[in-house]
Image: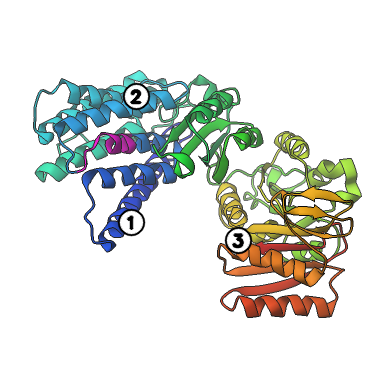
Amino acid sequence: LNVFPVPDSDTGTNLLYTMRAAVERAEGEEAWISEGGGSAGAREIAVALGHGAVHGARGNSGVILSQVLRAVGEAATFTVVDASTYRRALRTAVTLVDHALSDPVEGTIVTVLREAAAGAGRSSATSLVEVARAAADAGAVALDRTTSQLPALTRAGVVDAGGRGLLVLLDTMVEVLVGEAPERPDYFIPDDPFTDAPSRCDGSDGGATDASAGTRYEVMYSLTHSDDVRADELRSALRTLGDSVVVVGDGGTGDNARWAVHVHTDDIGTAIEVALPLGRITEIRVTDMLDPVGEQSAGGHGHRERDDPADDPGHPPRALERTVVAIVADGPLADLFTEAGAVTVDPGEHAGGVIDAVLAVPADEMLVLPNGELSRAQIGALDAALRDGDGHALILPTGSVVQGLSALAVHDPSTTLSLDGFGMADAASATRHAHLVRAEQDALTLVGRCSAGDLLGVVGHDVALIQTDPVEAVCALADRLLSSGGELLTLLLGDEYDEAAREAALSRLRSAHPNVEVVGYAAGTGRVLAHVGVE
């Protein structure tokens, strides 16, 4: 039934992924409480459902569903979910969703939710069964009307897919209570639903307006270590970059709170970058809504000759070429990336021409690994240049070469660009990293005073240790990263480590951490003496 923003049939999948995440979280909560000898109450299970849904939300429809489940948790008492709880939960869900959406559109899941809440509110019954039935019946009536409310649905002759998904859950609530689901008409797809439908429509799961016809990418990520004020600030910033903006929280507090962020935009990099000062970003997902499964035979970033077989109408479409470009200095490190299948660009050789060097790499699809070598301004400029090209490209958040290697290790060219990029970004974010440099002058650091020539162990952007012996320094840095766990330790050791020093460091760490796999590679010359990564 999902015909917009493109007929890619993903709304049901998004709802399913979101609901599975909710159920898994609730089952885990119940098991954890049971192991402690307790019994999970209705509120604990309901809250866990909401948290799981926000954490695993997919698409606009999934994000909206997460707020419905979150609302049940906020309304539930410890012992029961009763008629008044259900009324209050649906009413709260409407409030949460209205606050979260940038421009709610009638004829979508939002409309079905609002009418279901109104139906429950109009019922004077004290029985949960009757209130649940009233909500489901009102939702069904609202769903039938969506075909005439939204032009995209009218042209395709279907009801709203997100609203249909919500009705499945409303009806299932009735079925769980009475053993039988309400009878509904068959919500079918006409024989030729897209004959008169444009390739771009004017809504998406309740959050988009006509502006969505000008946007191409769906960007989603999670935000932690933030608060409601900063979430509102992010929501406002995203509204200037695109449409279908949804920023919703799981109701948690402090560092445990999480927000699901969704926007349709043409400016992927900026949509992510605006959140950087507002919290911690994880789980970035980007989908090309015009080519969700990567089937278009678009031209690459490099020049394609006119006599390319792909230009011949009688020739089968050629497979898209996906290339990973790693920004890394020439030498042993570049050799590691090349052996793993990447094309390397040396930032030192190109100075201000790094962007031109990346654009010169021929590819239909491109994944760029900055590896901490590009400034934020350079990344922004590269993103703008890539968007002006004919191909599709993603810049992945690799802050060091060890994160870049971790990302490259899970590169899967057989899947879609967005899924490949997500998997690689996930692997990079799961790799803790640090590096070792020499102090250029006397200075005061967070861990004390250093002298010119001292070895400084840097974790993130902060000096975490000061040493004078290279082996002692790299081992201490690795020990610090492993203090919070890890299965694989990677050392990239520069020329200051001769063969004896490399073996000494590796042997010492293998002995100190027998359950960790320790590997080491030569890194060549450079300002950084050693890179350390833990996965």
Specify the amino acid type for callout 3.
Val
**What is the spatial separation of the Cα atoms under label 2 and label 1, in whole angstroms?**
28 Å
User: Which residue position holds label 2?
Assistant: 95
Viewport quadrant of the C terminus: bottom right
Q: Is residue 270 left or right of residue 26?
A: right
Which of the two marks, 1 or 3, is nearer to us in this view?
Answer: 1
Q: Position of residue 438 (x, y in %)?
A: 85, 58
Do labels 1 and 3 touch, CB within 8 Å? no
Against 339, residue 419 (above or below) is above
Specify the amino acid type for callout 1.
Gly
Which numbered disc covers residue 28?
1
Q: Residue furthest front?
A: 448
Q: Which residues are magenta?
A: 68-78
Q: Earlier in the sequence, mark 2 or mark 3?
A: 2
Secondary structure under tag 1 reads helix
- Whether residue 469 appears in magenta in the rendering, the answer is no
Do labels 2 and 1 touch, CB within 8 Å? no
Which numbered disc covers residue 410?
3
Specify the amino acid type for callout 2.
Thr
Q: Is residue 527 left or right of residue 8?
A: right
Do labels 2 and 3 touch, CB within 8 Å? no
